[in-house]
Image (spheres, rainbow, N blue to C red):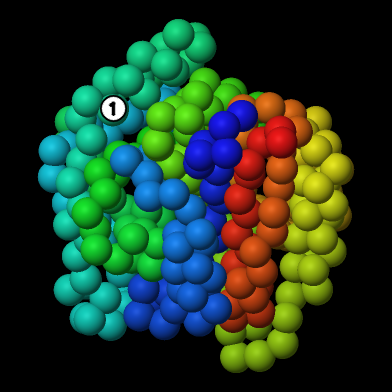
Amino acid sequence: MPSTSLPSLYISHGSPMTALQPGAVGPRLAELAAALPRPRAIVMASAHWLSRTPTVSAAERPRTIHDFGGFPEALYQLQYPAPGAPELAQDVAARLAAAGLSPVIDPQRGLDHGAWVPLCFLYPQADIPVLQLSIQPALGPAHQWAMGRALAPLRDDGVLLVGSGSITHNLHDWHHYAQGGQAPYVLPFIQWVEQKLHADDVPALLDYRRQAPFAEQAHPTDEHLLPLHFAMGAAGTDRLGARRIDAGIDMGFLAMDIYRFDGAA
């Protein structure tokens, strides 16, 4: 694989408040972007766009979606006015169709906070074209991995493929740990994921529900981990070349791990 090929990424985007209170993840994302070749475009698979079939956004000027409630007014004033990538959307849809994944195109979809919050730190100038790709929780990890694998060749054409979710995501625990302490399942779960990624154990990661410790506590539902499987598939090979970037644990239950996948050396 050429050394100029972009990695695929998995980002834990955390709460929408990350945009105003970046904690450790903001600087880690800025450092990561500085270490990468500048992409010509970005494809974001976000945990906040769920659908029955793969859907590709093709808006020329995707709006900033404030898909949350009850936060400070300053958060609703933030905009990420990046251009869209309609031509790339057609290419993405064609590649997914060739893989038998039956995509559709949405000409109006904007950027939800799973996309624009991390992009504010990765590329704050908002001058790189971005499109979003939905995920399909009902179809499971292997389907999401297949979507990433279908798009992996785009990495050699200057496209940054990003899965945005959260390495742990149990919002039921907000009241238990937001004021202090740490959920006991967080470290065992993220350590298991790191071990399996470094071992290139794709089958175990696709079967995390049965094999990972505390899987149900870490993820009562799948949608925030499925972008990890997308990013794994986008590595383009079962030799993932995984590198973990530790961005801490937010509010005691949201681990903020970032991974880059460089594929086979």
Vertical relation: 147 (above or below) 63: above
Residue at the far front in the pictured view? 3
| Residue 238 shown left or right of residue 90 in the figure | right
Which residue does the numbered mark 1 point to in the structure image? 89
Give the residue displayed 57% in from the left and 32% down from the top: 2
Tell me residue 94's x, y (percent): 36, 14
Task: Indicate the quadrant where residue 113 lies.
Answer: bottom left
* Count of number-bearing discs: 1
Residue kind at label 1, given as amino acid type: Ala
Q: Residue furthest bottom?
A: 179
Closer-to-camera residue (223/101): 101
Which residue occupies 42% across, 24% down?
53
Say few, some or many: other residues with alpha carbon within 10 Å of mark 1 (under 14 / 14 to 19 / 20 or more). Answer: many
In percent of width and height, residue 125 lies at 24, 63
Which type of secondary structure does the marked residue at label 1 adopt?
Answer: helix
Q: Residue at x 66, y 69 (%)?
A: 246
Q: Position of residue 82 (x, y in %)?
A: 21, 52
Whether 83 is drawn above or below 13: the answer is above
> Looking at the image, can residue 147 be seen?
no
Q: Quadrant of residue 251?
A: bottom right
Residue 107 lies in quadrant: top left
Quadrant where the C terminus is found in the figure: top right
Residue under the point 48% across and 53% down: 36
Which of 215/230 is in front? 230
Give the camera-side residue of 125 and 5: 5
Of all residues, the one furthest to the left in this rendering is: 61
In the picture provided, is 205 more to the left or to the right than 47? right
Q: Is residue 230 left or right of residue 130?
A: right
